[in-house]
Image: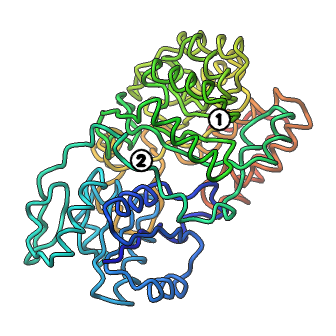
Amino acid sequence: MKILFLSVPFTWAINPETPPIGIADLSAVAKKSGYNAKAIDMWKYNEAQVKEAIKKEAPDVIGTSCMTTERFSSYKLVKWVKEVNPKIKVIVGGSHASCFPEQVFKLSPADVIVMGEGEETMLELLDAFEKDKTDLSNIKGIAFMKNGKLVKTEPRPFIKNLDKLPFPAYEDFDLKNYVNRFPDDTTNPKYKKLFKKLKGISVMTSRGCPWRCAFCSITTSWKRTWRARSPKNTVDLIEHLYKNFGIRMFNFFDDNFNVDNRRVIEICREIIKRKLKIYWNVQARVDTLNEETLRWMKKAGCYLIRFGVESGSQTILDNLQKDARVESIIKVFKIIKKVGLESNVHIIVGNPGENEKTINETINLIKIVKPDMVSTFGLFILPGTPLYERAKKEGLIDDNYWQKDSEPPLYTGSLTEDQIRMYVYKIQSSFEKGKGTLNYIKYLARNIKARINRPGDILKYGIKILKTELLKKPVASS
């Protein structure tokens, strides 16, 4: 039996920087179990190319994902598969499918939905398909239609030991097709020049996050659990990519890399012990880091940490259930500067309780901690989050919203969309101004388009932003 794992087409406006790790994981697990499996990244495929690939590969089963932002591309992919060969079994996973299985079956001819973690469930489904079993009700963690009614089976427990999973099937992809954006992840001229010559890739070494941020969809898939590959197994993965693929730069896109600082230190020690000359960056929670951990990270090749700071207002942090204190953020950033690591601060605008005062508190925090980079975004409403439930109660959205082909909406319980976009600009521009006139001009030229969510708004907000700059007036709040 042949299995294809396909990424969803048309999900990137520009070349992605790394292969789709989710289907690479599933491909590796299927291969380890003896199946003829392959993962194909279809990000730039059109309908004709998708159908041609399916005809050429002639699979018996296809697995793909359905995430919220790409859900209609997922539905199209499933329909195209069935148009090529209606006998192909199509398995759909992903957070959106887990939240809205009824909608997935209504809007696509999928056969089965995997709800939650996919590896073990997928293997049981493949075994059932191979044996032509028609009763799937004993397989945990799935949804399917039976006699016109939705059937959801018992939830599947999470995999406790991630070390037992094989490394993702990076060999299924041509790594030359992916863009090296590591030079953009540093402000250090020496690193920028060096990184242009080296190969980089993203890796995931843990799953989940134990915190409870109101806007975060991670809990949709992982609840509030956190599991990780052991330090040795993590560095085994790094060394595998280092020796077999020539990778020298790594982006750890774990949801929260530093849940366990002892594990982080052991990973660093293992990298140093094996004399792996690598450069890496992580996404981490700022208030749980300490100087010992940061020094080990620096020594082992870490150059940048991305922090979801979200806001400089304690009121907003509390409303977002961040369980973080502004003073703790300031304290850790002093250590980050002392150790010599770069930082990228992520800020969210439009949070519950947001106003001019909280925006100014955020700007003030940025001025105090002096990060190397700032990335500012509007607050989007995502299914399965506490924010989503709040937005439903406030009449801002309902479950039917996701049955139309629209992007996730901005949360407008405290600010209008116009205010959110202008405050995004205000925060970002306040940071860029502090970097010098030339950098600020470059920022304006580069980000008028990038910081605005809808293409149709470019002219409207671009003119408004330029007028603000040329006339030296404060940014409008309404």
Nearer the observer, disc 1 or disc 2? Answer: 1
- The quadrant holding residue 306 is top right
Quadrant location, the C terminus: top right
Relative height, residue 204 to residue 291 (above, below): below
Q: Position of residue 137 (x, y in %)?
A: 8, 64
**Residue 142's x, y, as percent?**
19, 60
Badge 1 or badge 2: first in the primary sequence: 1
Residue 363, image x, y percentages: 66, 24
Q: Give whichever of 459, 389 is nearer the camera.
A: 389
Say above or below: 146 vs 93: below
Q: Is residue 351 above or below residue 140?
A: above
Q: Residue at x 30, y 50 (%)?
A: 117
Name the residue located 61 percent from the left edge and 59 percent from the top edge.
Answer: 454
The relative height of residue 336 versus residue 421 in the rendered view (above or below) is above
The secondary element bearing badge 2 is classed as loop
Q: Tell me the amino acid under the disc marked 2.
A: Ile
Q: Is residue 79 left or right of residue 105?
A: right
Identified at 54% across, 10% down, the residue is: 327
Residue 253 visible within the image: yes
Q: In the image, residue 138 lies at what x, y percent?
A: 8, 60
Q: What residue is shown with label 1?
A: 280
At label 1, counting other C-alpha atoms closer than 10 Å, the crowd grade (few under 14, some 14-19, many 20 or more) is many
Dot 2 alpha-carbon crowd within 10 angstroms: few under 14, some 14 to 19, many 20 or more:
many
Question: Which of the two residues, 354 or 53, is positioned nearer the viewer here?
Answer: 53
The residue drawn where x is 85% and y is 37% is 440
Q: Amino acid at mark 1?
A: Trp
**Which numbered disc covers residue 381?**
2
